[in-house]
Image (cartoon, rainbow, N blue to C red):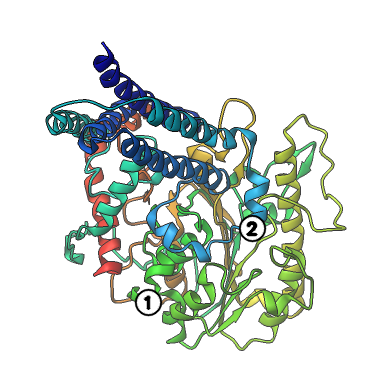
Amino acid sequence: MRSLKDSLLPILIVLSFASILCLKNYLFAVRIGDGIGTLWIDYAGFALILLSLLFLSKSLALTLFLFFLINIFNSLMLFSNRIYYRYFGDYITLDIFSLASNIPFTWKNIVNLIKFKDICLLFDLPVLAIISMISVRKLKFSLKNNLKFALIFLLLGISLTGTNLLLLHKTLPYVLTFRYGSSMLFNSMSVHNFYILNIFQEGIKKEKIISSSLPSELVSNDYEIDKKFKIKNKLWNIIIVEFESLGAEVIGRKIDGQEITPTLNRLSEKGIYFKNFYSQALTCSGTLDVEFSTLTTLYPSPKSPYAIKYANKVPFSLPKFLKKHGYKTMFFHANKGDFYRRSTVMKILGFDELYFYDYFLSKERKIRGIDDFPFFLGCAEAIKNSSQPFFAYLVTLSSHTPFELPGGEKPGLKINENIDENTKKYYQIINYSDRSFRAFLDELNKESILEKTILILFGDHTRTIPESKGGEIGIVRETMKNKVPLIILIPDLKGDTLDEPSTHTDITPTILSILGLKYDGTLLGRNLLSEKGESFVLINRNPVILIKKENVLWGYLDKGFRNCLKNCSESEILESNKFLKIIKYSEYVLKK
């Protein structure tokens, strides 16, 4: 009886520890995301693999020590991913680890984001440590045939893990090779297998795809403009303004009878307004993803900031191309130049002059960067002193989370509606950014610069908002998460509203069409002012969002995606293979 007790109790202890670990992970996945139903299979397999260690080691102390190390790793990964997800709306990948020094995430940010329920993820560690010490002292481990039992439990564990991968393959095709978004994978497998898969995907060779394999109807490089626009081709000045966290929801919207964005509203009526424009922000550096796609027409990766890793490999960039045609190129950002290595990236992409925090420092100091009003005035000053034609790319900052107005700035809106406090703060800071932009336009109008300038305005992504009740902090759900405004203003051109589905990769081909310039190579975006070609939007996240023709078809390429689309046939989903070729081509160009 004593021998049976010594045999069974260690097994029960290890199984209990494994169950606690698996339960913690499962609840984390279900709580924070869309935990897929097969997740428990992966954790059951993981528990059996842990149990095999008990038989293989022949030492209860060593087994519990190994388990404790695994649990520490697991708990720290869950804790850090919870904080990271709360701020960025995504999970940490190996690429993010490698770029940690460039992520603008300070200890102050971390402390402000931590909640008591996060610390609960670590509560089991001291308890398990105490139980482990007592168990090692009180129990004698006396199982025979250790290797045989170890192999049995190990094979069972691996079989269950493999079963989960097979089930995932039905909902996430090519799960081993295709770079799905982190959120879908993290909620579909154990945290350990998530990182093992991440390592595997980093090591495999990408399929070589040549440009001729791309569907011609998707990359036609058509530079003709629909005659209805009556645009005169010439080398206009170009100003692009990328507004931080500007979602389509605020354009034309009123709160208590007040316009949130009166300046942008007027410009959307005066210019060409694309009401179905979707963001390419995918990673923690979502704004940089957008800049990368806008300037190169290549697609960012949901795994890592491509602009940082592959800026020196892009075959085409808009500022480099424009410089060949006599343009002066300028890039403006209100933060420091090492913020995601922008000072290096933008120089590689071809900008002559870079204006960062230090340039604006004498105008107004702010911990996170320069507020929009002094930022826009500083930009206007540099632009007015520039030679022409010029290409200026501006990136605002004030409307970044936590949506705080600058010190001493009074709210521009009187909001009495019963909405949550964070939304009120968001509306106020967007209104401040809109008013600051108005001052920028006034400064340029004094020198009549806008009369010779194409003005292109868009959001980088929508806001990230904290949960109310019933959900973890994250990014606004899928449609609104990706939908941002695009406004193109061309002197003497009448306003129009287009429902043409579009994204940031389409901006450069459209600019070249307006200027009357052509690029001989392959651009993955489309000319939005052409009457030819197929309308679609491709977003490389989980893995792809498709929007084409009159019907907006967007979602994941999985069973859930099929179920949520009422107007999408099976044949249309199968057609997605040609879109996936574009993603693979984009990756190949950068990694060859």
Q: Split into 4 quadrants, where in the image is the N terminus?
A: top left
Q: Is residue 368 visible?
A: yes
Q: In this rendered view, identify the residue nearer to me: 55 or 6.
A: 6
| Residue 151 image position (x, y, % from top left) | 14, 33
Which residue appears at 58% of the width and 47% of the height? Answer: 87
Left or right side of 400 for 543: left
**Farthest top residue?**
1
Which residue appears at 38% of the width and 41% of the height? Answer: 70
Question: Rounded to the nearest whole Å, what is the CA distance between mark 2 and mark 1?
Answer: 38 Å
- Marks 2 and 1: CB-CB under 8 Å? no
Graded by Cα atoms within 10 Å as few (under 14), some (14 to 19) or many (20 or more), the crowding at tag 2 reads many
On screen, 399 above or below 360?
above
On screen, 276 above or below 288?
above
Disc sitting over residue 270 in the figure? 2
Q: Which residue is mark 1?
A: 312
Residue type, label 1? Asn
Which residue appears at 36% of the width and 24% of the height? Answer: 13
On screen, 377 above or below 107?
below
